[in-house]
Image (tube, rainbow, N blue to C red):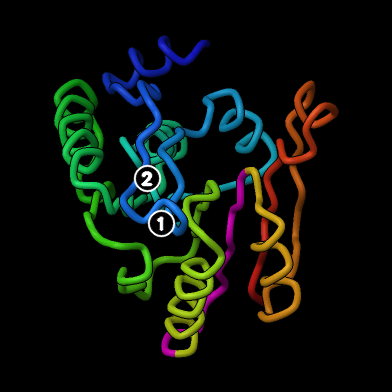
Amino acid sequence: MNEYKFDKLLHIRTSEEKKVAYPDSIQYNPYEPTPYHALETLFKHYELVTEDQVVDFGCGKGRLNFYIHYFLGSSVKGIEMDENFYQESIVNERNYFHHMKRDGNSLEFICCLAEEYRVEPNDNRFYFFNPFSVTIFRKVIDRILRSVKEVKREVELILYYPHEDYIYYLGNNTSFELKQEIVLPGLYEKNPDERFLIYRLY
């Protein structure tokens, strides 16, 4: 299915209508949803179960969140700093649950800065589509690591279009280890950034 048909199936609107530059554009990147074809590839090779709780940093209008909730049944939270995108995700949520028979308690959107989000004990999968600078990424990872110290559990990071600064930081400054690489056929050959990297904290 194409982008429009996926949105129609889920009764949401998540297409990228225009680039939105944040006030501090050096630290925060413009909105761009993960393509549906990329999500299809990811979840052909990466498993989520209903017990997982996914946190999507920079969720925008919530595309990843609704996709996971509908197709995989995992709990998922969207963290978004932009009030307008947050409000659009809430509208999408209302339309989604109006048409779908799903558990509303397992889908949530929170409007706050990523580095201010308080990681909860059940959060164990964290998604990043290059949403912000490595400076903020480090702060988010630090919060994840502190949470794991408080409540021991296995956590994984999912990076799409991974920035080399993220890769360097994880490899040289944390205990995360690369578990899996998933490339997008037909795109990766022309652009090596068209891939997912999965990191696990053992």
Could you give the CA–CA distance between mark 1 and mark 2, rounded to whole angstroms?
9 Å
Q: Which residue is depicted at the point 71% across and 62% down? A: 167
Say which of 101 and 184 sits in front. Answer: 184
Q: Please state which amino acid type lies under the numbered disc 2.
A: Cys
**The C terminus lies in which quarter of the figure?**
bottom right
For residue 127, side relative to residue 5 (left or right): right
Q: Which disc is residue 59 wearing? A: 2
For residue 66, side relative to residue 185 (left or right): left
State the count of labels: 2
Name the residue tied to disc 1.
55
Q: Where are the magenta residues, as a range?
A: 150-160
For residue 165, side relative to residue 146 (left or right): right
Q: Whole-percent x and y of residue 57?
A: 41, 54
Q: Tell whether position 156 is magenta.
A: yes
Q: Secondary structure at mark 2?
A: loop
Q: Please state which amino acid type lies under the numbered disc 1.
A: Val
Q: Is residue 37 visible?
A: yes
Neighbour tally class for label 2: few under 14, some 14-19, many 20 plus, Cα within 10 Å: many
